[in-house]
Amino acid sequence: MIKEVILEHIKVSNTLLNQLDDIEKICIMSYETIKSGNKILICGNGGSASDASHIVAEFVGKFEKARKPLPAISLSENISSITSIGNDFSFDEIFSKQIQAIGLKDDLLIAISTSGNSKNIINAIKASKDIGMRCFALSGNDGGKMSSLTKNIIKVDSKKTARIQEMHILIGHIICSFIEEKI
């Protein structure tokens, strides 16, 4: 079983080679956002919430090189905002309300949903568009409903949540490395 999981990981990783242009595009968008003085907002649910926080930590702290902190926020972190919005409005609005509060035109939203169908992620994408933010989505399989909301999407070619999340972290690390090379 262990060998099978590792081989499956390698197989799914290899499919990312077919999306090098899209991966480069999210790297460039991320770099341009930072370079222009804007910020990156990232959101996800469950394991993808942890992935959002992980990627933000690499931006704000460091990835491989000591450098100035980069402006990035995980919308999955503020438990008081999340629970108050969820309680007073709806769980479907936990990210969109935060985007309305702190998102600015030309900021970048990286929306993560392994299924591409999470209602609160869909609403986050819509809210970012209303403000004039740029948006890039990370998903799996066919991209779900997110595919119809943004042309900027990387769909990991797998139906297994674990493999999709592993690729999302890999893409996040590639973005961090790209930015650190450019700064």
Image (cartoon, rainbow, N blue to C red):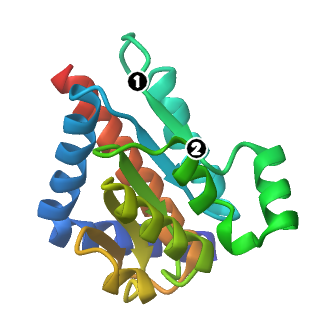
Across and down, in percent, residue 183 comes to 21, 19
Q: Could you tell me which residue is drawn at 53 percent across and 77 percent down?
A: 4
Q: Quadrant of residue 174?
A: top left
Q: Could you tell me which residue is drawn at 27 percent across and 25 percent down?
A: 180
Q: Nearer the viewer, residue 99 or 162?
A: 99
Query: Whole-Å distance between the Cαs marked 2 and 1?
Result: 13 Å
Q: Secondary structure at mark 1?
A: loop
Across and down, in percent, residue 66 comes to 39, 10
Image quadrant occupied by the N terminus: bottom right
Q: Could you tell me which residue is drawn at 21 percent across and 47 percent down?
A: 29
64 versus 96 height, above or below: above
- The residue singled out by tag 2 in the image is 74
For residue 14, side relative to residue 44 (left or right): left
- The residue singled out by tag 1 in the image is 70
| Crowd band around label 2 with a 10 angstrom C-alpha radius: few (<14), some (14–19), many (20+) | many
Callout 2, which amino acid? Ser
101 versus 86 height, above or below: above
Circle 2/circle 1 CB separation < 8 Å: no
Residue 39: mark: none
Q: Secondary structure at mark 2?
A: strand
Q: Count how many numbered circles sit on residues in the image.
A: 2
For residue 9, side relative to residue 91 (left or right): left
Callout 1, which amino acid? Leu
Across and down, in percent, residue 177 comes to 29, 33
